[in-house]
């Protein structure tokens, strides 16, 4: 292959059991490239990293650049790395054409010969650099300002892929495909361990909650977790707040009695009447202070001072006063919490969960609970590959989790 352009790249880590090497080879072949393994030193014992050097060939310079960009996400870096290449944005809200599109993995850029950690890892962003300060950070497209300098191409980029833990870790036994047949008691025990550890580390555990949390009777048990200090923030939409407050004021959810499970005459109006009541008070917080709202999930959030972000949608009735109808503003506020998260529970809310998954660093331990196995599959397809899926009724799951953590003897 003497006439084809090539570049030598290297990778280090647990290349075989974490599938870093096979994935790299597959990616090159899928893109119709070629490679030659120049060196492959396999670790002698389980804790030893392996090291490999490959020569990647492309049809031409553009194809080679495409190949090298594609395998960067697996941890490949040039044997003789160059500094990152920058280009200034020429207008607000638009990246340079050749911008590097980030993953949610820990990433470094090479500035003046030094590898600099990129702050706030998040997928589908650009990397803004301040060469003078030796700093780099992810920036979403809507926050780009003309004159900002962004990394372009693949040169000077190093990504640290997630590797399979060398020791037994929470979730290791759950790392298979989504299934409804995994042992629920063991799963609940492991997630309880994660929440304890997250709290101990002083990091946030975020819950993304859909209205099914109310419909299935999980809201009181989620309130128990909040009161115990295991949950640091709640993300949801107008529906979770509306139906929780409907349940508190009228004892129904979507007009169905939560005690009897039967429709209530005129119950189809209850959610609107709940919204109207809160809007008359001025806010959910004001309704609590005025003694109008005296129980429920939203009441617990207000009384404990636990932050919540309610993002609006075109489907919303009302909406509730705290609902943020500017979705970009809601996204920005959610992102601040996401970057501080150590764990995230996604409870029966497909679209909201996918949105939050896009904001989370890959290091955040993420659990998606839904009766529909397609939900976690969609999360993985969008890049949130660290997500563990649990196919079960969310009401039973949250109750079991709260009971497990009750044993801590607060």
Image (cartoon, grey):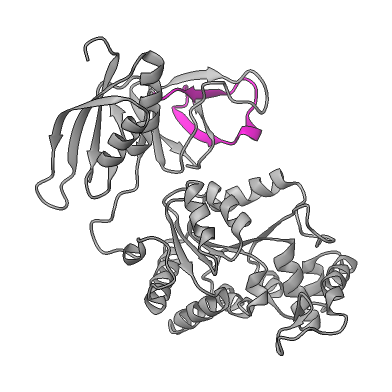
The residue shown at (30%, 22%) is 81
Residue 110 visible in image:
no
Residue 389 painted magenta? no
Q: Which residue appears farthest toward the bottom when viewing the image? A: 260
Residue 271 visible in image:
yes
Q: Percent x, y for residue 196?
A: 43, 70
The residue shown at (24%, 26%) is 35
- Relative side of 2 to 227, left or right: left
Seen from the viewer's position, the closer of residues 174 and 27 is 27
Q: Which residue appears farthest toward the right when viewing the image? A: 280
- Relative side of 103 to 370, left or right: left
The residue shown at (47%, 48%) is 361
The residue shown at (76%, 69%) is 242
Q: Is residue 134 above or below residue 58?
A: below
Magenta span: 130-154
- Relative side of 25 to 189, left or right: left
Q: Quadrant of the N terminus?
A: top left
How many badges with numbers are in the image? 0
Seen from the viewer's position, the closer of residues 83 and 179 is 179
Q: Percent x, y for residue 292?
A: 83, 78
Q: Quadrant of residue 168?
A: bottom left
- Relative side of 257 to 385, left or right: right
Q: Which residue appears farthest toward the left when viewing the image? A: 44
Q: Percent x, y for residue 131?
A: 46, 22
Q: Percent x, y for residue 237?
A: 70, 60
């Amino acid at each position: 292959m003497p006439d084809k352009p090539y570049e030598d790249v290297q990778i280090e880590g647990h290349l075989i059991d974490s599938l870093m090497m096979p994935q790299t080879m597959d990616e090159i072949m899928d893109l119709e490239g070629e490679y030659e393994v120049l060196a492959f030193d396999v670790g002698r014992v389980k804790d030893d990293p392996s090291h490999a050097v490959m020569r990647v060939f492309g049809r031409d310079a553009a194809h080679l650049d495409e190949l090298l960009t594609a395998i960067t996400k697996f941890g490949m870096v040039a044997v003789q790395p160059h500094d990152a290449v920058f280009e200034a944005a020429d207008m607000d809200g638009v990246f340079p054409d050749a911008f590097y599109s980030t993953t949610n993995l820990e990433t470094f850029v090479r500035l003046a010969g030094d590898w600099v950690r990129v702050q706030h890892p998040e997928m589908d962003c650009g990397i803004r650099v301040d060469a003078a300060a030796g700093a780099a950070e992810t920036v979403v497209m809507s926050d780009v300002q003309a004159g900002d300098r962004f990394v372009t191409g693949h040169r000077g980029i190093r990504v640290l892929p997630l590797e399979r833990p060398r020791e037994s870790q929470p979730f290791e036994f759950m790392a298979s495909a989504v299934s409804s047949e995994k042992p629920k008691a063991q799963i609940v025990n492991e997630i309880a361990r994660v929440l304890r550890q997250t709290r101990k580390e002083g990091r946030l555990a975020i819950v993304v909650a859909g209205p099914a949390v109310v419909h299935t009777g999980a809201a009181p048990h989620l309130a128990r977790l909040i009161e115990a200090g295991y949950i640091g923030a709640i993300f949801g939409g107008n529906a979770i707040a509306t139906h929780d407050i409907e349940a508190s004021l009228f004892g129904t959810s979507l007009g169905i009695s939560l005690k009897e499970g039967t429709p209530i005459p005129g119950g189809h109006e209850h959610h609107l009447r709940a919204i109207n009541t809160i809007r008359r008070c001025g806010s959910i917080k004001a309704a609590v202070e005025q003694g109008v709202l005296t129980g429920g999930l939203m009441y617990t959030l207000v009384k404990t001072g636990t932050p919540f972000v309610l993002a609006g949608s075109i489907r919303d009735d009302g909406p509730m006063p705290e609902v943020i109808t500017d979705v970009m503003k809601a996204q920005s506020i959610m992102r601040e919490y996401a970057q501080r998260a150590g764990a995230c529970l996604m409870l029966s809310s497909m679209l909201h969960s996918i949105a939050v998954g896009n904001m989370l660093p890959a290091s955040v331990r993420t659990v998606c609970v839904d009766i529909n196995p397609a939900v976690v599959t969609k999360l993985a397809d969008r890049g949130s590959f660290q997500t563990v899926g649990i196919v079960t009724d969310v009401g039973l799951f949250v109750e079991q989790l709260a009971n497990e953590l009750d044993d801590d003897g607060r």
